[in-house]
Image: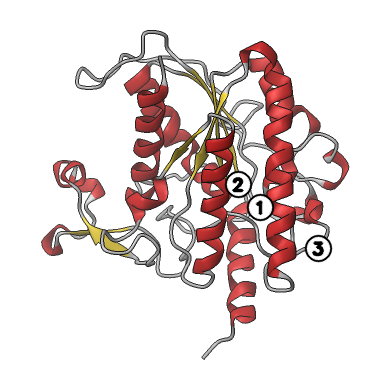
Amino acid sequence: MRGPWIVGMLVAGLLLGACGDPSSGPQAPPPSSPAVSATTHQRAPASPSARTPVKAPRVLYLGDSLAMENQKVLGRELRRELRAGYTSAPYSGTTLCDYLEGTAERSLVPARDKAAALVRSLRPDFVVLQFWGNAWDFTWCMDGITYDASREKYFERYEADAHRLVEQITAAGGSRRPRIVWVLQGPDPITPDRVRRVNGLYERLAAASDDIVADAGKTVSPAPDRYAWTQYLPCTAHERAHPDYCTQPGRGRTALHRDDDYLHFCLAPTTSTPKPCPVRSPGILRIAREITKTIRQSAP
């Protein structure tokens, strides 16, 4: 049986394979994307069945490799359902401290794309933060603190960085402070308690700052157990109505993960170049729809 540290190294390899090599610094967006990853301000009519906010919200989406693969689908859902103005600037392999101002020299995120810098320039109504919680030693700004080496030290540092990020976003927003949407993460089969604690932190931060959580992780979990990992789930009604998203219709279920990657939800093979997922992937759509629903319910 493989020990946790061996599995950790495997996951680190998957992250780096999907996200590029951190030693090379922040990766440039793919040629088809604008200067900020998938930045767009296009708007589309909302679905007739959705409650459309009186004012189309402006949404900023930041995060790690999960956000990198999700960004185009989330933008599509937000524009279609809410007529939202949308900007995304995810960087693969990152964690919360990478988006803190003052960490540019030891970070995968350049100064122009720090959370506070983007809040000042874009004035969003919502800042969506999706971070799985980097637990291994390849994010420079964590100063070598890892979950395996010292769990309590890891959580102390992660919580401190989360508080600093909220403070910087709040200061940057001034009288027009955006609401933060903390995206709760899905199950982790190797460190399930870590995900529970990270999600618990996000919930406490949201409650303390009048912010909100989007439980996207619940949509990729089996109904009986929110933190039980699974590769397949029963198809939803939406997936049954759209066969491309119900990957095993004969069995009434759909795939969330590839056989060789239990973390990411993109069903295309990982590459060395960070990019949005290029294929239809049920897990990504589930996550994007939950985030969109949460913003719809919170927008005026």
Q: Assess disc 1: are there few (<14), some (14-19) or many (≥20) residues with their C-alpha within 10 Å of its C-alpha.
A: many
**Comparing marks 1 and 3, which lies closer to the viewer?**
3
Q: Where is residue 89 in the image (x, y as percent from the top left)?
A: 62, 33
The type of residue carrying mark 1 is: Gly
The type of residue carrying mark 3 is: Gly
Image height check: is 102 above or below 21? above
Return the disc, 2 or 1, that comes first in the chain's sequence: 2
The disc placed on residue 144 is 3
| Badge 3 element | loop
Residue designated by label 1:
93
Q: In which quarter of the image is the C terminus?
A: top left
Q: Position of residue 40 (x, y in %)?
A: 53, 21
| Badge 2 element | loop
User: Is 213 in front, or is 255?
Assistant: 213
The type of residue carrying mark 2 is: Asp
- Whether residue 53 is visible: yes
The disc placed on residue 224 is none
| Circle 2/circle 1 CB separation < 8 Å | yes
3D distance between C-alphas at marks 1 and 3:
14 Å
> Who's the residue at 39% across and 32% down the image?
294
Residue designated by label 2:
64
Return the disc, 1 or 3, that comes first in the chain's sequence: 1
Q: Position of residue 63 (x, y in %)?
A: 59, 42
Q: Which of the 4 quarters of the picture holds residue 90? A: top right
Q: Which of the 4 quarters of the picture holds residue 171? A: top right
Q: Position of residue 55 (x, y in %)?
A: 41, 8
Residue sticking out furthest to the right: 105
Task: Specify how the rendered protein is coloured.
Answer: secondary structure
> Who's the residue at 68% across and 67% down the image?
147
- Whether residue 114 is visible: no
User: Is 241 in front, or is 155?
Assistant: 155
